Image (tube, rainbow, N blue to C red):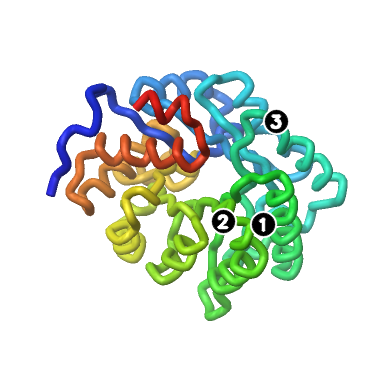
């Protein structure tokens, strides 16, 4: 059943909950790209601050300080785990105190590319969970399994259950690609489930099935820009304005309009991060 109007304000309202705005793919037109997002109704972007690893850990904070509508995260991606040092952990502990830093991430495990050894990925993941808990920040999780039976999902969720769930800080499963049982484990630990442009890909039926079942008030949308451009932009550089295609796909699955999905997921984002002024404006 289609819902009625959610607000008297009929402006489209969307949040891109995960974008890598600092990357070189945007160097030629970053201001224009951000303006396109604003023109499309994307009113808030969470800039992910993993950058290229150590040496660029403040990359999202610099952008957030320049733009009122951008917030930031900090973290070392599993790809760069082998580069992490005690100096980097100390730097992040200080960066976590910056007012526009909302979360620690993206962190987690990547058994697909294995750019860092898996035992090192796990050690750096655990260290960052400790730091995030000390900073009282939720975590943004990257989890990508290999094509064989060694499943990053099992390891990732086990580590979260053993080392994070008791914190009750929750987090976000970014760019969710797992099956529904994995989503339920994360939901039980207070996580939000975020869907990206790959939900529009023809072979992504598992992702669409999870999006059908995820409670609407626990769902976020993202682009993961500049990666994973949704249909009809697949194969091109992704950018935050394209998050509306993710909302459109979820709307088709749930019997909602694109704008209704945008509004609901924006509310979810503001509520999860206790951005009360933003939430009260809806």
**What residue sits right under mark 2 in the picture?**
142
Give residue 216's position: percent from left, percent from top.
Answer: 32, 50
Q: Is residue 81 above or below residue 91?
A: below
Element on which disc 1 rests: helix
**What residue sits right under mark 1 in the picture?**
78
- Residue 29 visible to the viewer: no
Quadrant location of residue 66? top right
* Mark 1 Cα-neighbour bin, 10 Å: few <14, some 14–19, many ≥20: many
Can you tell which mark lies on residue 236?
Answer: none
Give residue 59's position: percent from left, percent from top.
Answer: 67, 33
Disc number lying in front (3 or 2)? 3
Q: Earlier in the sequence, mark 3 or mark 2?
A: 3
Element on which disc 3 rests: loop
Give the left or right position of residue 153, taking residue 137 as reference: left
Distance from label 3 to label 2 (Cα)? 23 Å
Q: Are marks 1 and 3 in contact (CB under 8 Å)?
A: no
In the rendered image, which quarter contains the C terminus?
top left
Distance from label 1 to label 3 (Cα)? 23 Å
Disc number lying in front (1 or 3)? 3
* Mark 2 Cα-neighbour bin, 10 Å: few <14, some 14–19, many ≥20: many
Quadrant location of residue 38? top left
Give the left or right position of residue 89, taking residue 267 as reference: right
- Residue 270 visible to the viewer: yes
Compare residues 24 and 83 and report the one nearer the observer.
Answer: 83
Q: Residue at x 51, y 51 (%)?
A: 172
Q: Are marks 1 and 2 in contact (CB under 8 Å)?
A: yes
Q: Residue at x 50, y 56 (%)?
A: 190
**What residue sits right under mark 3 in the picture?**
98
């Amino acid at each position: 059943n289609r819902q009625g109007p959610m607000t008297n304000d009929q402006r489209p309202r969307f949040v891109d909950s995960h974008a890598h705005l600092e990357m070189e793919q945007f160097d030629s037109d970053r201001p224009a790209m951000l303006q396109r997002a604003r023109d499309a109704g994307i009113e808030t972007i969470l800039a992910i601050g993993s950058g290229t690893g150590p040496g660029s850990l403040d990359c999202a904070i610099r952008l957030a300080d320049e733009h009122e509508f951008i917030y930031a995260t900090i973290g070392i991606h599993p790809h760069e785990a082998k580069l992490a040092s005690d100096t980097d952990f100390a730097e992040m502990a200080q960066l976590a105190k910056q007012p526009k830093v909302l979360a620690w991430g993206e962190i987690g495990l990547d058994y697909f590319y294995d750019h860092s050894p898996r035992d090192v990925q796990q050690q750096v993941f655990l260290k960052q969970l400790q730091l995030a808990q000390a900073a009282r920040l939720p975590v943004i999780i990257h989890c990508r399994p290999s094509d064989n039976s060694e499943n990053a999902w099992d390891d990732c969720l086990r580590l979260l259950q053993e080392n994070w769930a008791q914190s009750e800080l929750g987090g976000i499963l970014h760019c969710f690609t797992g099956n529904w049982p994995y989503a339920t484990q994360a939901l039980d630990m207070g996580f939000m489930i975020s869907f990206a442009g790959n939900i529009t890909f023809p072979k992504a039926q598992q992702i669409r099935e999870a999006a059908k079942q995820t409670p609407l008030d626990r769902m976020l949308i993202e682009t993961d820009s500049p990666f994973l451009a949704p249909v009809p932009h697949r194969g091109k550089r992704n950018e935050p304005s394209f998050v509306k295609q993710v909302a459109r796909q979820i709307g088709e699955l749930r019997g909602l309009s694109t704008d209704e999905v945008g509004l609901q997921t924006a509310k979810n984002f503001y509520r999860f991060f206790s951005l009360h002024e933003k939430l009260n404006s809806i």
